[in-house]
Image (spheres, rainbow, N blue to C red):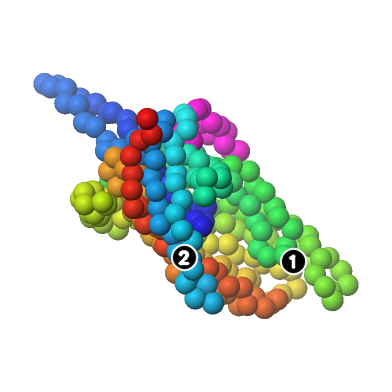
Amino acid sequence: MKNLLAVVVATSLMTVACSDDTVTPTTDKTYIPSAVGTYVINSNESYTTEGTIDDGEDSTVVVGTMSITDGKGVSKTGIMHITYFSGDPVDTVILAQEGAKIYSLLDLELAAGDQFPPVNLGTRWVQVADANATSSWSALSETVSGVQFEYPGVPVPLTADAQFTMTCAKVADTTMTITGTSVPTVKYTTDFGITISIAGFPNPIAVTLKSFEYYGENVGMVRSYQDAGTVETPFGALDIDGYNSVAVRYGKQN
């Protein structure tokens, strides 16, 4: 349905600007309400080597707020969202907003195909959006070294190093119409990369995914998409599926 980078939402905070003469309150815009029961319903498609697949609708619902410390010891107040498909929970996303910046709690795991054992680096609070940004920013740079794995036909275990990178940028302020209502939105890009260097192999395996995210004021994510692609590796071609998720309804449960 969506990748781990597909849902980013926000809660509102207030800041105060001070001068010698006046105190002027300014309010950072909310890109998703934090009230429990707030939801967004999305229509989803997947793009594969076999064509386009209609994945149907899912819904992402706010279920609570909590203080969470990530694997690096960084603490933030996060809003928990659960995504449902056909009535069943399929994903949990935790996000936080500080001023105009939005953070996602990511669970970093290297799992590049059946040949590589999964390696978990733990959780990280990662900045995925900034409504005031004027240039791109490095949201993530993590390296794991000395991963050993076996490959059929190779008599000895192979050793690999892997690096995760993530760069984000604000593209534009725009609008999107949902059920007849014009919703102010902010469009972002996310470039997520994994580079795997295997000892004894001349060239690393580099996987780069570019996605686009739109966040609607007082609604949440109103669209996310990523094109399909293919990455050549020493073990054969790796197909990367694309997706398109568009908000079709939003509201709050009674």
Q: Which circle marks residue 54 in the picture?
A: 2
Q: Does 96 lie within the magenta span?
A: no
| In the image: residue 73, left or right of residue 41 | right
> In the structure shown, which secondary structural element does the residue marked by tag 2 occupy?
strand
| Image quarter of residue 18 | top left
Magenta range is 66-80
> In the structure shown, which secondary structural element does the residue marked by tag 1 occupy?
loop
Q: Amino acid at mark 2?
A: Asp
Q: Quadrant of the C terminus?
A: top left
Q: Does 76 lie within the magenta span?
A: yes
- Who is closer to the viewer here, 160 or 87? 87
| In the image: residue 28, left or right of residue 213 | left
Label 1 environment density (alpha carbons within 10 Å; few <14, some 14–19, many ≥20): few
Mark nearer the viewer, 2 or 1: 2
| In the image: residue 118, left or right of residue 76 | right
Q: Amino acid at mark 1?
A: Gln
Q: Which circle marks residue 144 in the picture?
A: none
Find residue 235 and report its horizontal and vertical position in percent.
Answer: 70, 76
Q: Which residue lies at the image location 49% right of the left edge and 36% below the top edge? A: 80
Check the image and report above or below for 217 versus 77.
below
- Asked whether the viewer can see residue 173, the reply is no
Find residue 173 and report its horizontal and vertical position in percent.
Answer: 24, 53
Q: Which residue lies at the image location 71% right of the left edge and 68% below the top edge? A: 198
